[in-house]
Structure formats: C-alpha cells, structure tokens
Amino acid sequence: MDMASCARAMVLVEPRQIAPTRIPTRDIDEGGWLATEATALSGADVQTWRGDLSEVRYPLIPGRQVVGRIAVTHPGIDVEVGSRVVVEPAIRCQNCPGCNLGLATCSRRQPMNSYGLISSVVPPGLWGGLAEYLYLDPAANLHEISDDVSAEMATFAHPLAAGYTWAVEIPRLMAGDRVLILGPGPRGLACLLAAKAGGASWVGITGLSHDEDRLQMAQALGADLTVDIEVDDPAQAIADDLGSRPDVVIDVTSHDPEAVFTALDLVRSGGRVVLASTKGNRALHFFTDVIVTKQLSINGAVGASNSAYKWACRQLEEDPRIDKLVSHQFPLSEAQRAMHATAGLLGHDELISVAVTF
Ligand SMILES: [Zn+2]
C-alpha cells in the first residue's frame, strides 16, 4: 500500500478542545502502520474528552476501537500488508508485573499503555483512532477480520469482545444460567449477545427512560425482559418474569454507583456479580454483610481478553444483526460532533454506537 508522509488527525489539545492537524508518519524500524478505516468512540473516549481521567496527559488523539488495513510492516508485526485487522486498545508488553499476571493494564508505558490514551508527544505520535494512520506497536494485539464485514460494523468487535469476557469468561457462564445486565449501552447489548451465544437460558437488561431505543434493540436481539428502572421496580419485574433471581448480574452502567447495590441485591444467593463500570472515584457506603450472607462471588472487569476478540471477529461474520448496533457515522472532519453524539449531547434517539469512518 502507498503510505502518505502525513496523516490527517484530530488532536485533543486539552479537554473539550479538538483541533484538526497533520502529523508526519515518520520512519520506524519496528512495528508498523495501519491505514485507519473506522474508529468507534466509547465512554472512555468521552471521559478523556471531558478531562475526567486525571492520569491522562494531553495532547492526545482519541479513539481506541480501531479497524483498518495493515499499510507497512517491520519486525514485530506478523500480519500481511493489506490485511484488515481489529487492533486491541490495550498494548501488552508481556514483561511487566501486570502483563505477567494476565491483567488488562500494562504498566510499561506510563501513565497509560493503551491506544486513545497515550499522549501524542510520545513518538511517533499517532496513538489514536481519530487519524488516517495508527502506529502499530510491536506489542499491539491484532485480529484479522473478513473483508465481508463492513469497517464500521467491524468496530463493534471491541464492545462485543468485552461483552464475551464480562458475560461468559469471567462469570464462567454455564448453559442454562440466568443473566441480568444493568445498562443497555453498546457493552450491555454486547453482553446480551454473548450471554445468549454462551447458552444463557434467560437474559434481562435494565436501563433508564432515555435508553428506550436501546431497550427496544435489546428486545430485537432476544432479551427475555427489559426494564426501564425509572418506570418499573426491577426486582418486581424480574420476580414476575423469571420467578427466581438471576445467577449472574453484570454492572455495565454509565458510572451509576446505585448499580452496585442493585447487583448485590438482585443476584441469587451463591451467585456471581461482575462489576465492569467505574464510579468516578466516588465512595460507596454500604453494609458488606450482604456479600457474606449471600456467599457472593464478585469480579472486577476491565477490557476484553485475546480469546474474546477472536470470538467477536468470528461472530461478526455470522450475525448480520450486529450491523444495526453502529447507529451513527461521521467523517473525521466531524470528530467533535461524533464525540458530542457519543456523550449523548445530541440526544439519545436511536443512539447505540458511534463510528468515525475514513
Ligand atoms: Zn506490560
């Protein structure tokens, strides 16, 4: 592939200040270059845009859910030029204490070692998906995906992989398990798809009134129960529908501290709770006795596993319904608007996942 000497990029100069710029694609002697085809924006990008993550250093190029074609390879990249790949956001050095423990967070590059979160002052500068080219670190994890899947649909590999890790791998989902998902965002809907594919016999999902379209999508994707918690009491709705308590509850809400109480309250005794949503450093005050007396297993979850990415890339080829989950598309020049859409500032009607396409 021909490689341009400069990449058009949208740089987050400081919180809420996105500026178009051009960044040279310098000569590299290891790793490679990816020609970006599409980048989905996520809650983490919105947090970076708002300035909510104190450890992040600006300027940076947002965008951590990237799909593209391999343009240039050097030692460290073993995928052929021209291949379409999904790039995992987390770069894992396989050497630091976190990597050795199999954790999602690698501490080799401080303060962050993840696409969309590394400052653009770190050479070669192109570390985010809102740019024509992305630098492929030799430790980047790449997953080939079929040309039959559109680039924007392929961006859903990222939430889908997270859904598989959180709903299937971490709670060790067994056939027949009943699963409740708190939060119907892209990752909540991905948990639904993964739980159903993993053999769950019942999947319920809760949201707020402004999530109406997302809850309707959940029904179309096979949810057995959807609950608007601003209208109905979820405990009552689940009791009426299921007649018992769910085996697994997954918190995928958007920073709702109450969801932790809801999860611990609604799960059955001996059940599993997966917490996949941070609470903005807010303290929670509650009695831990519920964990003891109900003998609960609680897992914190960050990111998706390598095996979950492989599952997600296969699933995208097999499930055309996933195409509907990428609801909004913007060109790179409208990155600011795309960020506003992701943050819900343009309204919630039909909003599920937002992609910037090239
Ligand atoms: Zn590491």
Image (cartoon, helix red, strand yellow):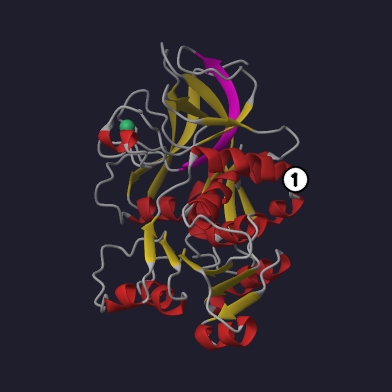
Q: Using the image as rendered, state which of residue 266 and residue 32 is in the foreground.
A: 266
Quarter of image, res 163:
bottom right
- The span picked out in magenta is 63-73
Label 1 lies in ligand 1 vicinity (Cβ under 8 Å): no
Residue 132 located within the stretch drawn in magenta? no
> Looking at the rendering, in which quadrant would you find the C terminus?
top right
Amino acid type shown at disc 1: Glu
Drawn side of residue 305 relative to residue 150, left or right: left
Drawn side of residue 76 relative to residue 93, left or right: right
> Looking at the rendering, in which quadrant would you find the N terminus?
top right
The location of residue 225, given as percent across then percent down, is: 64, 76
Q: Using the image as rendered, state which of residue 89 and residue 326 is in the foreground.
A: 89
The location of residue 214, given as percent across then percent down, is: 62, 68
Quarter of image, res 278:
bottom left
Magenta segment main secondary structure: strand
The residue at which mark 1 appears reads as: 318
Which residue: 46% across, 78% down?
Answer: 266
Which residue: 63% across, 55% down?
Answer: 198
Which residue: 54% across, 65% down?
Answer: 346
The location of residue 250, given as percent across then percent down, is: 48, 65
Q: Using the image as rendered, state which of residue 155 and residue 224 is in the foreground.
A: 224
Drawn side of residue 291 relative to residue 231, left or right: left
Drawn side of residue 65 relative to residue 94, left or right: right
Q: How many marks?
A: 1
Observer able to see residue 238: yes
Which residue: 63% across, 60% down?
Answer: 175
Q: Using the image as rendered, state which of residue 255 and residue 347 is in the foreground.
A: 255
**CA neighbours of label 1 inside 10 A, class few (<14), some (14 to 19), many (20+):** few
Quadrant of the image where one finds ligand 1: top left
As displayed, is residue 225 above or below residue 7?
Answer: below
Quarter of image, res 324:
bottom right
Residue 68 located within the stretch drawn in magenta? yes
